[in-house]
Image (cartoon, grey):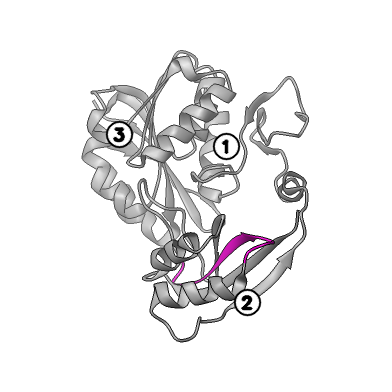
Amino acid sequence: MPWILLSLKTDSDHARQVEDALTDNGALSVTAIDAADQPLLEPGPGETPLWDQLILTGLFSDDSDMDQVQSGLKYSLKLDELPGIRIQPLEDRQWTRTWMEHFKPMKFGDRLWVCPEGFATPDPGAVNIRLDPGLAFGTGTHPTTALCLEWLDSQDLHGAKVLDYGCGSGILAIAALLLDSENVWAVDNDPQALIATMDNAIKNRVAGRIISCLPDALPTAQADVCMANILAGPLTSLAPTLARQTRAKGKLILSGILCEQAAEVNQCYGQWFDMHEPVIKEGWVRLEGFKKQ
């Protein structure tokens, strides 16, 4: 069946209000895109990233009365005119085929692949993670995630106990399990991320070796490998926690750090870890270290 798209311009302060108004007036779904070509960093755990200027688009059935929808939106938003309004028909299409044009299997290191559903694994003998693009961050496309996956691929994780702090989609936790770690604690502030992690763990047949929880529920892990792919600010504040959760001589891997932030984060963790030289990819940094005695 055909559909109707209605788009409005707004800003991050009013995005939730506009989203609610679209939904209240019959939108079946609402999506957001950047209206000003603004870079958007990968968020910390529990954060919802938004551009400063956005275009919100509601999807309506083709029998919707769009004049009535517009009147309802003006009433809901207390506006005389709707900013940047655009209405256009949308023909039904194979959405799966559409996103498959943009997401392909990706290789990290020598043996690790991330393969969306619907694709044959390029190397059946490799370590293949089945993961589709979704709401939780972490599909391998961002340099910070790629840096972590490449590091995991280079490690001997046999029997290791791993902590993934800020797990997002669970991609790093699942990679560690498929690379033969014993178990993984997957931690995130966002309950939706924990749901996504367990769904993806089930898809990859590793759910029995993963423990997902909110930060307050995390026991003392004493992990052999501690991973955190978030942002520099949260990483700095989490340093005592991650140090406490890592055993002596355990490995630390941090990402989500811009080049200009690396020295500060490195110095912060140097209280507890012997830190290595940063690894840089497209302006992002991976930091590594070993826990001191």
Magenta stretch prevailing secondary structure = strand
Mark 1–mark 3 Cα distance, whole angstroms, equals 26 Å
- In the rendered structure, which amino acid carries the disc numbered 3? Leu
Query: For the C terminus, which image quadrant?
Result: top left
Can you give x and y, in whole percent of width and height, for residue 265 in the image? Answer: 32, 51
Total numbered badges shown on the rendered structure: 3
Label 1: how many Cα within 10 Å (few below 14, some 14–19, many 20+)? some
Horizontally, residue 3 falls left or right of residue 77, namely right
The local secondary structure at tag 3 comes to: loop
- In the rendered structure, which amino acid carries the disc numbered 1? Glu
Mark 1–mark 2 Cα distance, whole angstroms, equals 43 Å
Specify start and end residues of the magenta stretch as a single range: 51-64
Label 3: how many Cα within 10 Å (few below 14, some 14–19, many 20+)? some
Which labelled disc corresponds to residue 214? 3
Q: Earlier in the sequence, mark 1 or mark 3?
A: 1
Q: Do residues under tags 1 and 2 come within 8 Å of each other at their CB atoms? A: no
Which labelled disc corresponds to residue 203? none
Name the residue tied to disc 1. 150
Label 2: how many Cα within 10 Å (few below 14, some 14–19, many 20+)? few
